[in-house]
Image (tube, rainbow, N blue to C red):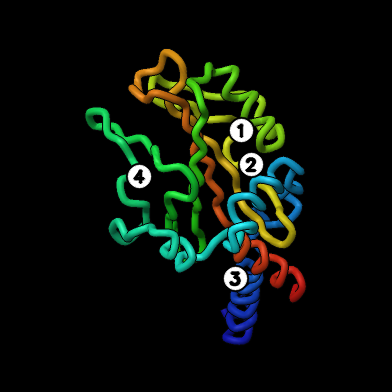
Amino acid sequence: MPVIHRIFLLAISLSLILTAAQKCPDHYSPRWFEESSDELNLIIEEYFLDRNISFPPHQEEMMKLGLKKRGHTHIELPDATIHYGELAFPVRTGLWRYDMTSAQINTTHLLVKEPTKLSEIEAINTYNDLLGAYWGDYDVTGYQMTLLVEDSRIRYKDRYFELNVKIYGLKSDATGLPTTYADITFRDYTRQVKAFIQCEEHQ
């Protein structure tokens, strides 16, 4: 094969590689995130903004609330969980845990306590009412209820995140908890979405 032809093919291959590398990750496109509900906005205001905490918060803000380092991956309020055998369940209400999932992704945990033990149907109805009807189904084990669809993608102003809810202490479950708790988690994808927007602008 002539040298010029080889160089030409090499140039095409390099061009294809660079094009693939520069393709914007559609997984983080803003179009996959729906606008936050009025109900969820009230929760964000009550537990974050009205208390002068950013949404989603920074690690430094969470540590000022009393959360302590628990290894390299998360910080947590002291005595935030109660143990039943090998299982642990959160019982410290409010902002109780902050996970450093990666250098770009953080997850904030907000624990809500109910005055009584709820049934499965009462629980999904309660949190659809509280947060804005994001869930149509749930998965339940003897110890935990997860509202489905998981990873509801939501936009609040210029912040992008996934919302999940896990519920403990339902009627007739095996947790031993005296009442029902809901762990509401906010996984922040704002950096990834903004990087996608910038990528699109430079295409």
Judged by depth in the image, the label closer to the viewer, 3 or 4, is 4
Q: Residue at x 30, y 45 (%)?
A: 79
Q: Position of residue 5 (x, y in %)?
A: 63, 81
Q: Mark 2 sits on what residue?
A: 152
Q: Mark 4 sits on what residue?
A: 80
Residue flagged by tag 1: what amino acid is it?
Val
Do tag 3 and tag 1 residues touch (Cβ < 8 Å)?
no
Residue flagged by tag 2: what amino acid is it?
Ser
Gap in angstroms between the C-alphas marked 2 and 3? 33 Å
Q: Mark 3 sits on what residue?
A: 17
Which corner quadrant holds the C terminus? bottom right
- Viewer-proximal residue, 170 or 46? 46
Q: Secondary structure at mark 3?
A: helix
Q: Residue at x 64, y 41 (%)?
A: 152
Do tag 4 and tag 1 residues touch (Cβ < 8 Å)?
no
Judged by depth in the image, the label closer to the viewer, 4 or 2, is 4
